[in-house]
Amino acid sequence: MGKNYLFTFLTCFLFFVVSHTTHAQSIEANISQNIEELSIYPNPVMNGKLYIVTKENLTKDIEIFNVLGKLIFQTTLFGKEVNISKLNPGIYIIKIKENNISTTRKLVVR
């Protein structure tokens, strides 16, 4: 009977170690994929125009969320200038997706 407990314990322990290692590797893979040479300026935005530049300057999907996570603004960017003059002053989260890689940043609008 003691062997059954030991076998069950070792099986559970091995399962935990393997699943934890796999999860850590998937998080590391996601962290290492960032949009190359991403530049968002000016931040804080004062004139309603935001510029987003990357190394490849491909088409970008832009989403802006409020601090509660509600989607406030969404557009597809073909150049580098985004008009966000309709946003109220505050702190937002901007999500930029280019070439199936997405990055999020804090955005301040004054």
Image (tube, rainbow, N blue to C red):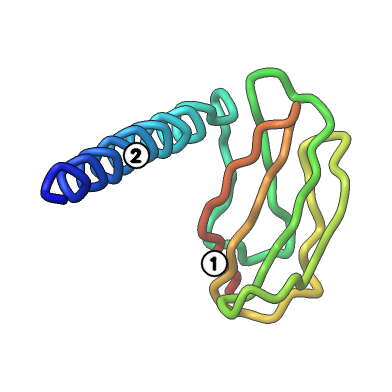
Residue at left offset 68%, top offset 45%: 96
**Image position, residue 17 (x, y; %):** 28, 37
Give the Cα separation between the discs numbered 1 and 2.
44 Å
**Image position, residue 56 (x, y; %):** 71, 18
Secondary structure at numbered mark 2: helix
**Image position, residue 44 (x, y; %):** 53, 62
Q: Which residue is mark 2?
A: 15
Image quarter where the C terminus lies is bottom right
Quick check: 9 left or right of 57?
left
Q: Which residue is mark 1?
A: 108
Figure quadrant of residue 92: bottom right
Residue at left offset 73%, top offset 56%: 49
Quick check: 4 left or right of 2?
right
Q: Is residue 60 above or below residue 109?
A: above
Residue situated in front as seen by the camera: 68 or 52: 68
Label 1 or label 2, whichever lies nearer to me, is 2
Q: Earlier in the sequence, mark 1 or mark 2?
A: 2
Residue occupying the far front of the picture: 1
Amino acid identity at mark 2:
Phe
Residue occupying the far left of the picture: 2
Residue situated in front as seen by the camera: 28 or 108: 28
Q: Is residue 26 above or below residue 43?
A: above
Q: Residues within 10 Å of mark 2 (few under 14, many from 20)?
A: few
Figure quadrant of residue 13: top left
Amino acid identity at mark 1:
Val
Secondary structure at numbered mark 1: strand
Residue situated in front as seen by the camera: 81 or 34: 34
Q: Residues within 10 Å of mark 1 (few under 14, many from 20)?
A: some
